[in-house]
Image (spheres, rainbow, N blue to C red):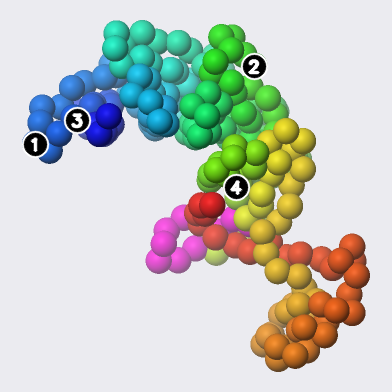
Amino acid sequence: DGSMLIATRFGELQQLHRLQAPLAMREQQTWAHSGVAAGAARPYASDAFAYLEPLRGGAASQMLLQRLSDHQLTPLTDGSHLDGAPLWAHDGKRIAFASNRRNGADVDVYVLDTADPGATPRLVVGGEGHHWRVYDWSIDDQRLLLGRELPAGNAGGGAGGGADSEIYIAQVDSGEVSPVGFSAAADGGGGGERAPAGQRAAARQRAPKSSVAVAAIRGRDALF
């Protein structure tokens, strides 16, 4: 409807407010005891938003759905795990988020259907020793753009802030994961200078598709 959600800090806590016009009065929407760590409005609607409340000093978090009309709250997660920020699908029903709920150490990717009260988050992508990030939904809501954190010492960093992740695309239904990148054969074999265009084209023609390894590109954020 043209309004926006903003975070406003009071002391050590921040809460969400609704701002309906430039220089208009802020309308407080959340009164979370531990404040709000992240929030996201339901897309293509003006009726609700999801937000994340940190618990136990940041060791855990709870995701909640709040209606704008009457501030009614619906818990989406139980607060016993460290869940990440909510990312809405374009359908306005499903939310993707990262969480350590599988074993308390690894960070996996889950999808939750908010239209189904009491639904259990469904594991989409996970792996031993991996920390995943959720970046974006594809326009058809069939794929997720993800980042997999690199091991300590290989994470990079720079002017953009944060650490590098390898970029992947996951199929939401099957959990199949594919790297976003370029084939090693097309790059002349990996490190060093890129081979001339003619050599790269010849390499692509020689190598069967099934045998060409794809190296994931690195980044700190990504969007479709």
Q: Position of residue 9 (x, y in %)?
A: 22, 32
CA separation in Å, label 1 and label 4? 36 Å
Q: Which residue is mark 3?
A: 19
Tags 3 and 4 in contact by the CB under 8 Å rule? no
Q: Which residue is mark 1?
A: 23
Residue at 70% from the left image edge and 91% from the top image edge: 196
Q: Which of marks 2 and 3 precedes in the sequence?
A: 3
At label 1, which amino acid type do we have? Answer: Leu
Q: Which of marks 1 and 2 precedes in the sequence?
A: 1
Q: How many marks?
A: 4
Judging from the image, what secondary structure is the residue with disc 4 in? strand
Q: Which of marks 4 and 3 precedes in the sequence?
A: 3
Q: Is residue 33 left or right of residue 219?
A: left
Q: Which residue is mark 2?
A: 120
48 in the magenta segment: no
From the viewer's perspective, is the residue at label 4 or at label 2 nearer? Answer: 4
Residue at 38% from the left image edge and 16% from the top image edge: 66
At label 4, which amino acid type do we have? Answer: Leu
* The label number, if any, that marks residue 145 in the structure image: 4
Q: Which residues are magenta?
A: 157-166
Judging from the image, what secondary structure is the residue with disc 3 in? strand
CA separation in Å, label 2 and label 1? 41 Å
Q: Quadrant of the N terminus?
A: top left
Q: Which of marks 4 and 1 precedes in the sequence?
A: 1
